[in-house]
């Protein structure tokens, strides 16, 4: 099913998909070829076993250049701040994740831009969720990124995520 969303922004698109979903569990995955959707069962297994409430895919680059250094460093710093603020042991705030649909809706995520995935983790931590990570393979993306491929995209992402951290 394709869900159309009139509001621009990563979070708007992700949230529209969440609200349109009809399954108990929902998964998020970038569709740029960098992540293999066949690895989603790795994320849903801890949920189905009752061991976690939110599972994040911790990216492991499959080959050199798959994850550009500036993006890795920014993710590392962001994850460090989240660990310090929340006590969660997360090392990657990557785009592949899974959780229960109704539980995610109850988090009342408001960011409709690039802060959406960070807000999800922060709100989950504030709600006392068990957040875990599983390793997933990270491949070179197909096509050009509007975020990591441009200065403007990186600035927007840093701004959006900084606003989430400031709340």
Image (cartoon, rainbow, N blue to C red):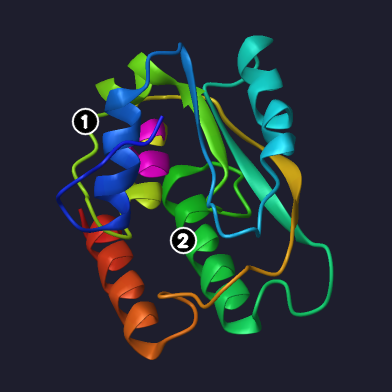
Percent position (x, y) of residue 67? 67, 72
Q: Main secondary structure of the magenta part?
A: helix
The residue beneath circle 2 is: 81
The image shows residue 104 at horizontal and vertical percentages of 35, 25
> At x 74% / y 63%, what residue is drawn?
139
Q: The residue tagged with tag 1: helix, strand or loop?
A: loop
39 vs 116, left or right, is right
**Which residue is situated farthest in the front direction here?**
1
Task: Give the CA distance from mark 1 to mark 2.
Answer: 22 Å
Magenta residues (range): 120-124
Residue at 34% from the left image edge and 29% from the top image edge = 18
Image coordinates for residue 48, horizontal then vertical, percent = 64, 11
Image location (x, y in percent) of residue 116: 32, 49
Q: Are marks 1 and 2 in contact (CB under 8 Å)?
A: no
Q: Is residue 142 magenta?
A: no
Furthest residue in direction bottom, as rendered: 151
> 162 above or below 47?
below
Residue located beneath label 1 in the image: 108
Q: Quadrant of the N terminus?
A: top left
Say what secondary structure mark 2 lies in. helix
Who comes first in sequence, dot 1 or dot 2?
2
């Amino acid at each position: 099913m394709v869900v159309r969303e009139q509001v621009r922004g990563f979070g708007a698109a992700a949230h529209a998909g969440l609200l349109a979903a009809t399954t108990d569990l929902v998964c998020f995955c970038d569709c740029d070829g960098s992540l293999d959707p066949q690895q989603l069962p790795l994320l849903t297994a801890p949920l189905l076993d009752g061991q976690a409430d939110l599972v994040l895919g911790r990216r492991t680059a499959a080959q050199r250049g798959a994850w550009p250094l500036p993006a890795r460093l920014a993710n590392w710093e962001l994850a460090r701040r989240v660990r310090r603020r929340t006590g969660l042991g997360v090392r990657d705030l990557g785009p592949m994740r899974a959780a229960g649909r109704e539980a995610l809706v109850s988090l009342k995520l408001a960011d409709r831009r690039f802060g959406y995935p960070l807000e999800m983790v922060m709100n989950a931590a504030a709600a006392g969720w068990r957040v875990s990570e599983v390793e997933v393979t990270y491949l070179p993306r197909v096509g050009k990124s509007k975020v990591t491929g441009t200065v403007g995209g990186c600035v927007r992402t840093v701004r959006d995520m900084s606003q989430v951290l400031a709340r």
